[in-house]
Amino acid sequence: MINQPGCYYCDRQRGGQDPPPGGWLIDDDDWRVGHGPAHMCLPGSLRIESRRHFTDFAEMTDPEAASFGRLLAALYRAADEPRRGTTFLNQDMSCAQADAETAAARIRHCLTGDTRLVREILGQPHGA
């Protein structure tokens, strides 16, 4: 990761501070994914942070762009299940900390319970 002085995300990664509700769902060489702050997000809202400092998608390297596409596809599939059957779009634009932690746990289960999704996140072929 490139450290940009004064950047909240760079400082956060360097210091290990302010973990998301329910902890990090993904924490690899390129990306960190966690539930957004409960006071600002609906249950199941995820925040994706790059490991390397950049401020525009055009600044991504080709490998980062490829891994980002795989990451989004896997996350959308995993996050879809916990949101089903809820009044997701009719809620206030925030949630309780416990709701955020529960949503993060359900998404983590979907990510880790389906080895196909984990392989996609890691960019491994299905037979690996």
Image (tube, helix red, strand yellow):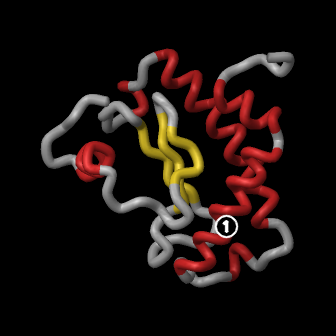
Q: Where is residue 10 in the image (x, y as percent from the top left)?
A: 27, 43
Q: Position of residue 36 (x, y in %)?
A: 49, 63
Q: Quadrant of the N terminus?
A: top left
Name the residue rendered at 83%, 21% in the picture: 126
Q: What's the residue type where badge 1 is placed? A: Ala
x then y, percent, for residue 11: 23, 48
Q: Considering depth in this image, is 64 or 128 the residue closer to the camera?
A: 128
Count of residue discs: 1
In the image, what residue occupies the spot 86% across and 17% down? 127
Up the image or down, 104 lies above or below 67; here it is below
* Secondary structure under the numbered disc 1 in the rendered image: helix
Residue indicated by mark 1: 103
Q: Which of 40 and 96 is in front in this view?
A: 96
Apparent side of residue 115 relative to residue 31 in the rendered image (left or right): right
Most foreground residue, 123 or 60: 123
**Up-down relation of residue 100 to residue 51 (above or below):** below
Residue ranking furthest to the left: 5
